[in-house]
Amino acid sequence: MEALALERKAERNQQLRERLLELKKEKNAIILAHYYQRDEIQEVADFRGDSFLLAQKAAETDADVIVFCGVHFMGESAKILAPDKTVIIPDERAGCPMADMVNVEGLRELKRKHPDATVVTYINSSAEIKAETDICCTSANAVKVIQSLDTDEIIWVPDKNLGHYVSQFTDKKMILWEGYCNTHDMLTVKDVEEMKAKYPNAEFVVHPECRPEVIEIADFVGSTTGILKYCKESECQEFIVGTEDGTGYQLRKDSPNKKFHFATKFLVCPNMKVNNLKKLVRSLEDMKPQIYVPPHIAEKAKLSLQSMLEVK
């Protein structure tokens, strides 16, 4: 019975993939998928990437329609950078708890208290917050962004863990907002130590959204793209991975002969996993839900995103 169910699922997925190809051609659409998406989404994407790469692709594409398989703030960034495109997401419930931890009123109050500070906002934030920001960053370019600024004081929003990590690479005063990623912040030193005891030959690679004490015991710290690159190029054959488990798709694709163990079974973002192949196809058929950003918000937010993309 189980084999039959798997066979039927494979048939349905094949039909969905064929229908998706028809729709992409018909509507001149491009599929962008974050590395944390389900395997079935990443398999059909035109581009897989982290927030920075996908923001670049959204800004550069000639497609008329962008289907962003990620969470809501990513769709907003795509719409801001490509306002003439139609941007849709497979499921409007795909939000980001960390992005929701910061609000405009609180950020404005912080800016009033520190009028000379430059506001640097992690791209994992809403369009409204980006509109209150001087420059955005991702985990991949955060250190470069901070080092590029001619200022002595930084207001950092919203991820305190990433902010703490970045602060080690600058003498600038950093005022950290008390936000965090629910998924990455869940990983503990105890989790890692247990995995190291189980897999003594494995290197521990971790995302800087994790807690400072977890980062301290890592063999490598980097963005999702940074982790993928390191694992692919490393001579080590076994890794304990401290980031969202969707990255397993690309890790295994890049290095099929290497072993990857996620540091805990709880490294799963439920919001990223809301999207699936069926919803992806349906969103293109119905051309909804579409992302809308009010023009007055989009205009200000675009400046902070463009400033980020200009950092070399």
Image (cartoon, helix red, strand yellow):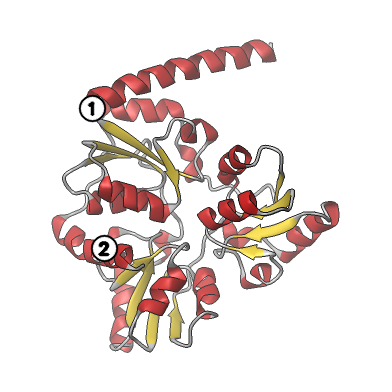
Which residue is more in the foreground, 113 or 153?
153
Residues at marks 1 and 2, CA–CA distance in whole angstroms: 27 Å
In percent of width and height, residue 136 lies at: 34, 67
In percent of width and height, residue 81 lies at: 24, 53
User: Circle 1 — which element?
Assistant: helix
Which residue is more in the foreground, 290 or 195?
195
Which kind of residue does numbered mark 1 sit on? Lys
Which kind of residue does numbered mark 2 sit on? Gln
Which residue is more in the foreground, 40 or 131?
40
In percent of width and height, residue 181 lies at: 52, 60
Identify the disc placed on residue 306. 2
Badge 2 local density, few (<14 within 10 Å), some, or many (20+)? some
- Residue 210's place in the image compared with 178, above or below, is above
User: Which of the image's four quarters has the C terminus?
Assistant: bottom left
Residue placed at 47% from the left, 63% from the top?
139
Residue placed at 38% from the left, 61% from the top?
123
Identify the disc placed on residue 202. none
Mark 1 lies on residue: 27
Residue 263 in sight here: no
The number of numbered discs placed on residues in the rendered structure image is: 2
Badge 1 local density, few (<14 within 10 Å), some, or many (20+)? some
Quarter of the image for residue 205 reads: bottom right
Residue placed at 50% from the left, 40% from the top?
273
Residue placed at 33% from the left, 88% from the top?
114
- Residue 181's place in the image compared with 65, above or below, is below
- Residue 124's place in the image compared with 162, above or below, is above
Quarter of the image for residue 130 reads: bottom left
The mark that comes first in sequence, 1 or 2, is 1
Which residue is more in the foreground, 237 or 269?
237
